[in-house]
Amino acid sequence: MRLLHLPLSPTIGVLLLFAFLTIQTCSGEQLDLNSHFHGFTTGKRINAYPYTAPERVVDKALARKHKKPQATPGPIYETTIATPNGAAAAPGESAADFGMQGGGPGIPGMMSNNRLPALQTVHPPPPNEKDWVLTAGNESLVDNVLAISLQYGGRLVSMGYYLRGQDVNYYAIMHKYSGPVFIKPAPMTFDELIRAVRENEARDLALTQVCGQEGKPGEITFTTYWERVPGAEFHIWFPGQPHADEQKTHFENNGYRLTYLCGYSEAGKGKYVGVWMKPTKSESQYEAHYGLTMEGCMQKDRLLVQKGYVATSLRVFNNKNQVLCTGIWENRNGRSNVQVGQNLETMYRNMQRNPNMVPRQISHYFDNYQNIVYVVLWSDVDVNRYPNPPPLWDEAPIPVRFLKGSPELLSDDQMEFLIKRVEHFMKDLNIPGLSIAIAKKEQLKFAAGFGYTDIRQQEPVTPNHQFRVGSVSKPVTAAAIMLLIDKGHFTLDSKLFGKDSIFGSEFSKKYQYPRYVTEITVRHLLEHTAGGWDNLQSDAAWVQPDMTTKELIEYVLTNVPLEYKPGSMWIYSNFGYQLLGYLIETTTGMSYEAFVKKNIFAPSGVYDIQVARPSISERAPREVVYYMSGNGLGFNPYEMLPPERIGPWGGWIASPIQLLMFMSRIDGFTNREDILSEIAISELATPSPASNDTYGLGWSLNIMGFNGWQHDGRMPGSAAMLVRLDNGLEMAVTVNKEYSERDFFHELGYVLHHIGNNCDWWNDDYDLFQKSRRSSRSATLPKRHLYRAEAQRTTIHDTTNPHVIRFV
């Protein structure tokens, strides 16, 4: 389902996030950023966060849902429910009230009635309509319902799907409560599941739901649901398999509890999978059963309910001509009820006698008429609701690792100021790890790592750790394009498609390209004015993940039309930079990654650098672990595109020091020789009219109240910012947690604001770049800091807010 396992696109520039700041420039001039920003959005489209529905859609949807639950008029919404003897159930009754039978060709269920609505949705009446939602229908409509629920803090608690011909239909339950970030990846094979367990454990992601389903005969995939539960230990269990009983005994003896159980059919045989976990939210006595027929399951439920048990899990599935069931019951206070039928609203009416009963779990089977039948477990018991983990830095000190020599170049007050700004940012947004580097006049003056690269291992971040930098990759690609222009391979005004162009008819026979495509130039791609392929609306760079870059280009040109004449509208586009990466490859005969390493990074003194790999097991030796934010749907940092697809627009990993080394060779300052011509650098910093003069070629321009260049970037689990100011300061910062709020870049930029305003710092001639590469300049460490440097190895700067300080 697209909504729940599509990775989030990289997005917005920092520009929007400073509209309410008033800052002080180095010259003392007050700049009111409201005056700078009020016209910024003119000519641009600012969109909602990609997985949320637009506000007007949300309002309309909720307006429709504010009515009291009642039977929707019209036969299309009415369902006839068959009893075991063939009589129709009375309105308001479900087949469960009659005791559903299992086994044999006589599986009862719905009479033949395929006139179900395209979408069924039920929820409580106002003012509690956001508390939960139960929905079923076709994929896109259910997507919209889930998006609305997510908008209001909903969390997925149960979900499934079935096929009708070529159509995919989904059903789901969402609850609104505060809990940890969760992900629901795409279905995976058994080998992928085992790898996911190993990799997700490293990020404290616990597997809380898993179930198998058969596609082609004998081909099983597993749907999974993961929540961040620090300290949790879990094991997957396949009951009925060899050694399953011994495993059960081992788990029980070691304090584990069976928290989830599900069944599926494989080659006509019933198979089962469960999750054992510790610690758990419940210590009540419990019983779990699998292999029951539907009739046996309902009988077991009635028997255990009479003994004071409550059903906490109940799922069904078809196996040949049977309906089989799994269930878990706990001996505790509360009530549960199983509703079976087609009409979700009828189920809800049955439950309204007890308003505390809410839907907890939904599954399905097909009756002997091949009609869909939903089985919904209702109860008034909250089980397996894991709390949102406490903030990392509420009580624990934030460890700091300085690049040796950094503290000696600052006074005590300056160091205190800088550390407090970084700590404030990390605590406010619960950032696990951050790295920052600052240069002045192309000399490195400060570098430090804060927090943890790996929370579970408590491995501190150092200045040399590498992070995914997201769209900060775009300035790198822009530099590579300008280098090829300097070498005469093409020009900024060279066209890419059509007659007398770079690609000619490569992507269209007889040059028959869609409207506007033949007008696109290299400049248009660099400055995001190609006329479409918006990364916020329908990011073309993310679609068809199994395609090669060439296949993707042909697909997008054919299926995603441009909306505007090139050059007339600024629309931020990842796909535009995908095209630039392909241009580099076809021009040089090298892969994009290899060309940039050799011709951009190596001349900058950066050698151990690469485009990010998608999985945690493939991460580079000094690469950090990435984490998701919030208490809702997360976007898995390790469900990414392959490197050849992501490199040109969002793929590089780097340390902040490496970013500044790259910057020092393209920035137009005179302390180090640039790898680009003066003309090329001037073009980088020339704003496009379509962007309201705020974006050049791969760089945002004149923002944050400073004259200079900037680019921010994010990918799921990471974010970065690279800044070059005309006053000579250059700054880079990276973090290993994604953001989902505007406050993120607002706060991150606020840290750099304060540093950028202090352009009277670092007036010595010492260059910490000498520790990383040869330098034409040398200097001696200022004597006034020689003693303090040694003392700071054990000094705590702020006794009310201690730091753990080390040098690397």
Image: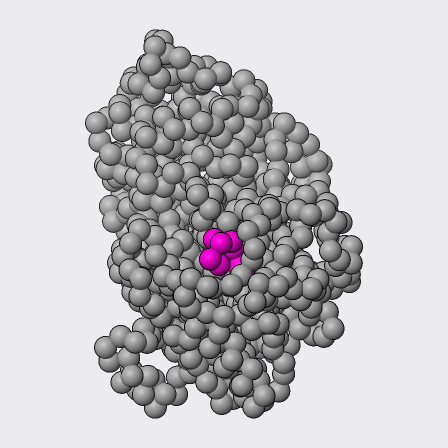
How is the protein colored in the picture? one colour
Vertical side of 742 occupied by 474: above or below: above
Vertical arrangement, residue 583 with respect to residue 458, above or below: above
Q: Nearer the viewer, residue 415 or 618?
A: 618
Rendering coords of residue 160 (x, y %): 48, 58
- Image quadrant containing the C terminus: bottom left
Q: Name which quarter of the figure residue 790 lies in.
A: bottom left
Residue drawn at x 43%, y 73% as measured from the top left: 293
Q: Which residues are magenta?
A: 367-374
**Residue shown at 69%/64% (left/top)?**
90
Q: Is residue 78 left or right of residue 361?
A: right
To which quarter of the image does residue 382 belong?
bottom right
Along the viewing direction, whichever of 588 and 787 lies nearer the viewer: 588
Note whether residue 761 is visible: no
Quick check: can you spot residue 235? Answer: yes
Q: Determine the residue positioned at 49% across, 24% down.
A: 561
